[in-house]
Image: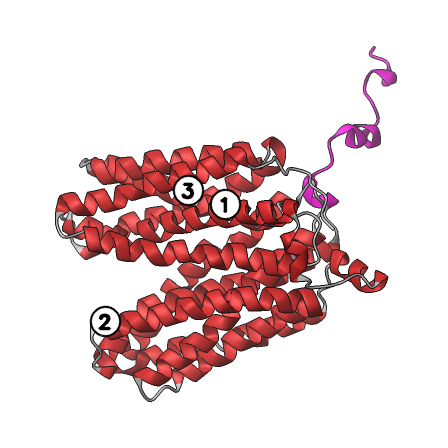
Amino acid sequence: MMSDHTSPPSGAAQAARPRAWYRDVSRDAWRVLTLSGLGWLFEVYEIFILSLTVPAFIAYFDLTKAQAGLIGSLSALGQIIGGIAFGWVADRYGRVRTLTLTILVYSVFSGATALATGAVMVAATRVLAGLGMGGAWTAGAALVAETWKPEHRGKGGALMQLGLPLGSLLAIGIVALVGNATGGLDGGGWRWVYAIGLLPIVILYPVARRTPESPVWLARVKTGEPRGSLADLRRPENAKGLAKAFGFIFFVQYVYWAVFTWTPTFLVTVKHFNFVHSLGFTLAQQLGSLIGFLVFASLVDRIGRKATFSIYLLIGAIAVIGFVTVEQERVLMVASFFTGLGITGLFAGMGPFAAELVPRTAARGFAMGLAYNGGRIGGMMAPYLIGALATSASGFKTGMLTTVVAFFLAWTVVLISPETKGQRIS
């Protein structure tokens, strides 16, 4: 007979098992992630509904494409200004207060867009909403980076960034539902899409009231250390870290907006698919994006930031080359999936990486806002540059392949940056 001592008691067996990482994350950290992640998700919704309702604005207000494009550019400008300005506000007055304020701003001005009586009012409300949209990522990303433990910060940042594909899918779903319910957006159905944008502050204000402030920010308040001192960023170690974060995000933003802006048009004009057929490839990109975020979260705190970014940059570059050059439909679908995985997966690590590159500063919110939202300039450049090159099929392909250069430059920044896995910040 086998002795009872040959098998350990169940309690000992459980103690021998490694503790699941999510059990090591505090309730406060999960609350921070909930507010920051949903604030970012609804921000993405706001960004995407503009692109989805532009055709309705053109028809309803009798706009030229140039006028409609100007509304989009002004909205992007508002996001850049708001992201940087609210970073400073978050340093001075706290991450949670600022995040709540930014959600209020983009919610209120989304509702105001629904009441627009002309294109000028649409442009004005989109600029003002953009201020809140830009600031929401900055305050939320800083809050997550400063609240989650160093050994889990990468996962926290990646889970927050899941709002990118989820917010875009929410926008597509809402626009489709409203369009079907109202008989199309052109006759005024677009107003309901923006009216729904009022809901985030209603949903998230109760969440914000239960969300704790960043312990790093609170420690500075308690000790009377300076908050929001921009001079602090001129210190050599902070200036170098900020420059690297800006450069990395600039090149990744270029790639993202180049590929995701032009994918449907490229498939129609170069690959000769009809628009409905091209949507299948777009959905494959979004599926790849979701999986890319989850895989990134599982890797980044294990193998480090540099290795994970390098893998994703390589996957993205190969996928774009395949997407541009192959003709077989099945291979093209696979390439579309991996463009989503490789490109948007890079966004999963932007928040923690930017925070860790300036680990000791009184102006982290401003630094992260400047790096991320300043980096959006790359995203503004890409659609215009590729559009200028796309005067022929070969020119369109050349334009899309400029992203390979951006991939390489982003990888160069990663190579010269320090490994920040487990970096403590203060």
- Residue 12: mark: none
Q: CA distance from mark 3 to mark 1?
A: 7 Å
Other residues around mark 2 within 10 Å, as few (<14) / some (14–19) / many (≥20): few
Residue toward you, 143 or 127: 127
**Residue 91: quadrant of the picture:** bottom right
Which of discs 3 and 2 lies nearer the camera? The answer is: 2
Residue 169 or 127: which is nearer the viewer?
Answer: 127
Q: Position of residue 308 (x, y in %)?
A: 52, 35
Q: Which residue is mark 1?
A: 293
Of callouts 3 and 1, the N-terminal one? 1
Extent of the magenta region: 1-24
Return the x and y of residue 384 as percentages of the image width and height.
Answer: 27, 58
Kindly state the secondary structure of the residue where label 2 is placed: helix
Q: Which residue is mark 2?
A: 66
- Cβ atoms under marks 2 and 1 closer than 8 Å: no
Query: Which x, y percent locates residue 373?
Result: 49, 59
**Does any portion of residue 78 appear in the rendered image?**
yes
The x and y percentages for residue 424 are 72, 44
Q: Residue furthest bottom?
A: 117
Please name the residue shown 48% across and 33% down the image.
310
Instruction: Report the amino acid beneath label 2.
Output: Ala
Please give the residue where the numbered disc 3 appears in the rendered image: 341
Colouring scheme applied when the structure was drawn: secondary structure
